[in-house]
Image (cartoon, rainbow, N blue to C red):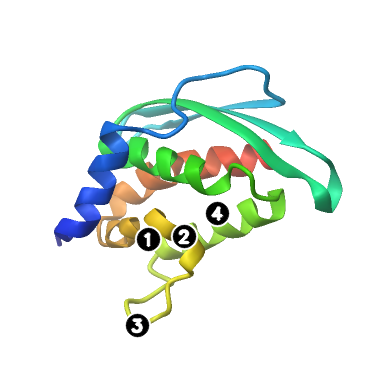
């Protein structure tokens, strides 16, 4: 199965003009992840303000080398989580993972807050690419844990 033209356009747009790409300081946490099957490498930096239930992802930066799926997914993730509470970021992470693991079907209502991340739903049909799309999100989970 190929990606639909609309979803492919979203992914390519984020690949060509990534949001918040480039490592920046200051940061609280740095996480490195590697995806052996595809060779993707990602470094993610996060800065959190506040604590407990009031903790917010104040800033995020990353550098990723790899396929267009891993690069675009990191860009989409950055756009979705900066400015949100850590709890919301965790919820988005879980929703995105469910989307990629085929636990959300075409007939299910897409959570509107997934925004451009919904363009990756067809990646679920390509098991080898799921880890590419989840690379940045897995790093985010580690950084916020």
Left or right, 45 with reference to 6 = right
Whole-percent x, y for residue 67 in the image: 27, 34
- C-alpha separation, residue under disc 3 versus residue under disc 4: 21 Å
Secondary element at tag 3? loop
Number of the front mark, 2 or 4:
2
Image point (42%, 34%), residue name: 19
24, above or below 139, in the image: above
- The residue that label 4 is drawn on is 93
Image quarter (top left, top right, bottom left or bottom right) of the C terminus: top right
Spot the residue most to the bottom.
107
Spot the residue most to the top.
25
Closer to the N terminus: mark 2 or mark 4? 4
Q: Nearer the viewer, residue 134 or 52?
A: 52
- The residue that label 2 is drawn on is 114
Whole-percent x, y for residue 10 in the image: 27, 50
Secondary element at tag 2? helix
Mark 1 Cα shell of 10 Å, populated few (<14), some (14-19), many (≥20): some
Secondary element at tag 1? helix
25, above or below 120, in the image: above
Q: Are marks 1 and 2 in contact (CB under 8 Å)?
A: yes
Left or right, 80 with reference to 142 = left
26, above or below 17, in the image: above
- The residue that label 1 is drawn on is 118
Residue 107, which numbered label?
Answer: 3
Secondary element at tag 4? helix
Closer to the N terminus: mark 1 or mark 4? 4
Q: Quadrant of residue 14?
A: top left
């Amino acid at each position: 199965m190929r990606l639909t033209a609309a979803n492919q356009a979203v992914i390519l747009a984020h690949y060509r003009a990534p949001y918040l790409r480039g490592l920046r300081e200051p940061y609280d946490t740095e996480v490195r992840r590697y995806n052996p099957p595809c060779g993707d490498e990602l470094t993610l930096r996060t800065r959190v303000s506040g604590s407990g239930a009031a903790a917010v992802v104040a800033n995020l930066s990353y550098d990723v080398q790899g396929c267009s799926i891993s690069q675009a997914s990191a860009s989409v993730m950055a756009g979705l989580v900066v400015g949100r509470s850590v709890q919301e970021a965790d919820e988005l992470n879980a929703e995105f993972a469910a989307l990629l693991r085929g636990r959300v079907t075409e007939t299910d209502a897409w959570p509107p807050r997934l925004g451009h991340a919904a363009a990756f739903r067809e990646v679920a049909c390509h098991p080898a690419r799921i880890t590419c799309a989840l690379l940045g999100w897995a790093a985010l989970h580690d950084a916020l844990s």
